[in-house]
Image (cartoon, rainbow, N blue to C red):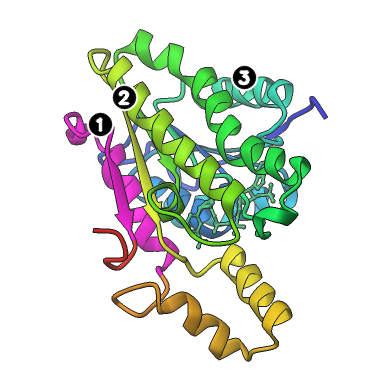
Amino acid sequence: MGKATTTRTKARTGAAAGPLAGRHALVTGGNRGIGAAIADRLASLGAGLTLLARDKASLDKVAAKIASEHGGQIATAAADVTDRTALEHAFESARQANGEIAILVNNAGAATSAPFKRTDIELWQNMVDVNLTSVFHCTSLALPAMVEARYGRIVNVASTAGLTGYAYVTAYCAAKHGVVGLTRALALEVARTGVTVNAVCPGYTETDMTARTVANIIAKTGCSEDEARAQLTALSPQGRLIQPVEVASAVAWLALDEQASITGQTIAVAGGEIL
Ligand code: NDP
């Protein structure tokens, strides 16, 4: 713990073009699922990138794929978002690789379910640390330079669980509601600095996290995979899971220079589940 390792993947092409050219975006949880889709979308718009997560091998693999498709400067930093010291090292090496961070996407997260009576303090603390305190850490490491530059975009990937309740995930829901509260309060605090702070709130999205939820339902109830997936898609008026690229598209839109007046918002990407 306390250590972060960083690698930089060379760009295929020269200077990147696009509306985010010259902007450095750091995406936590950028090695798979929603985070990898966000990284890909930001790179396609010309942003330089740092991808941060714990698993170095998958970080480097995703970075190489994005570099080969979009070019641009892509660094990776292996760190645990619950480890402040490791994050300090990771953010410093990200700055050295790609300059000050202009766009921070707090996406890393985890969901463990349990009935409240079996939610012990360890599970509770882990959900708060990974999903909420991580956002505090990363934001506090990136914000001072954004305020100094009078420009910044902070996008927190919360969840519909940050806007409503679901049974058997009290700790996760509490943490994600906390992310929404942090988003709203900080947006007001920095409203005159050129920094915007918003949250994107996906419904059940087709990633490893949802695959684990499906496996969990099957293990607990003995139902089939189709039945387990139907329980999740039934929550959506559109009757389907969200695709990672749909979440990525909303995040990238919020990251654009022209969204300067959109701050303190929670955007549900959930097929109409939250109105
Ligand atoms: P995945 O489980 O597919 O990916 C989770 C990501 O977070 C991985 O990149 C993982 O990397 C990283 N991560 C987890 N724990 C840590 C840690 N302690 N330190 C650093 N990185 C960590 O999940 P999704 O892509 O589905 O989820 C991304 C975000 O979207 C999460 O915040 C999640 O809560 C939220 N979300 C997801 C929904 C869904 O249905 N999938 C719905 C609503 C919100 P590594 O393991 O290498 O560290």
Instruction: Find the distance from the CA under tag 2 to the CA under tag 3.
Output: 24 Å
Left/right placement of residue 40 relative to residue 54 reads left
Left/right placement of residue 203 relative to residue 122 reads left
Q: What is the number of the mark on residue 92?
A: 3
Q: Is residue 76 above or below residue 34?
A: above
Instruction: Find the distance from the CA under tag 2 to the CA under tag 1.
Output: 6 Å
Q: Is mark 2 in CB contact (under 8 Å) with mark 1?
A: yes
Q: Is residue 257 above or below residue 177?
A: above
Q: What is the number of the mark on residue 263?
A: 1
Q: How many marks?
A: 3
Q: Which residue is mark 2?
A: 187
Comparing labels 1 and 3, the label whose residue is closer to the camera: 1
Q: Quadrant where the C terminus lies? A: bottom left
Comparing labels 2 and 3, the label whose residue is closer to the camera: 2
Region of the chain picked out in magenta, as a range: 242-269
Disc 1, SS: loop
Residue type highlighted by circle 1: Thr
Q: Residue at x 68, y 76 (%)?
A: 215
Q: Residue at x 68, y 73 (%)?
A: 216
Measured as percent of width and height from the top left, residue 46 is found at 35, 42
Q: Earlier in the sequence, mark 1 or mark 3?
A: 3
Q: Earlier in the sequence, mark 2 or mark 3?
A: 3
